[in-house]
Amino acid sequence: MTIRRIVPDIQVGSEQDMTTNRDFYGLLGLEEVMNQGWVMTLASPSNPTAQISFLTEERTAPVVPDLSVEVEDVDAVYAQVMASGAEVLRELRDEEWGVRRFFVRDPNGRVVNVLGHRGP
């Protein structure tokens, strides 16, 4: 299994909080690479897999995740997770912004968003 990136997801109270965080993390060299109003991702221009995301809410799932893990084959990982008996909080499905993902709870109670990017 190939992991492409791991991104901490931080829930914030408002879009203004996202702007404040963008400005702060900009001081550390991160730049905005995606913003859908309710979710914004910042990344390092020299290492684009070094990222952090801020969410005001989760629009297509029951909870805001604590962590996102992008994998090469999300369907295979989903099958492994289902076979393990782990608590799946959101079934595997395609999102309109080009990812396929599911949510699972880790042994510490954290919510992990497991995703893969769909082809063009």
Image (cartoon, rainbow, N blue to C red):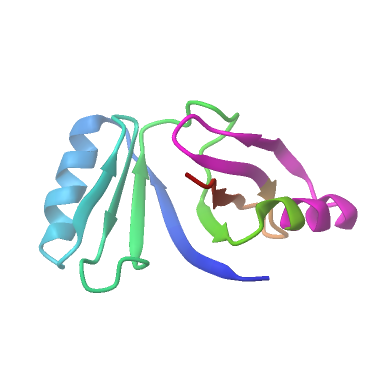
Find residue 43 and report its horizontal and vertical position in percent. 27, 60
Name the residue rendered at 75%, 57% in the picture.
Answer: 76
In-front residue for pair 93/58: 93
- Report x, y in % for residue 57: 42, 30
Q: Quadrant of the N terminus?
A: bottom right
Farthest top residue in view: 59
Apparent side of residue 93 relative to residue 49 in the rendered image (left or right):
right
Q: Residue at x 36, y 50 (%)?
A: 53
In the figure, is residue 1 to the left or right of 35? Answer: right
Quarter location, residue 89: top right
At 34% from the left and 68% from the top, the residue drawn is 50
Residue placed furthest toward the front: 120
Query: Which residue: 87% across, 57% down?
Result: 84
* Residues in magenta, as a range: 77-103
Q: Residue 116: horizontal and vertical position, in percent?
A: 56, 52
Up the image or down, 14 lies above or below 112; here it is above
Left-right relation of 24 to 99: left
Q: Nearer the viewer, residue 35 or 95?
A: 95
Is residue 80 found inside the magenta-colored segment of the image?
A: yes
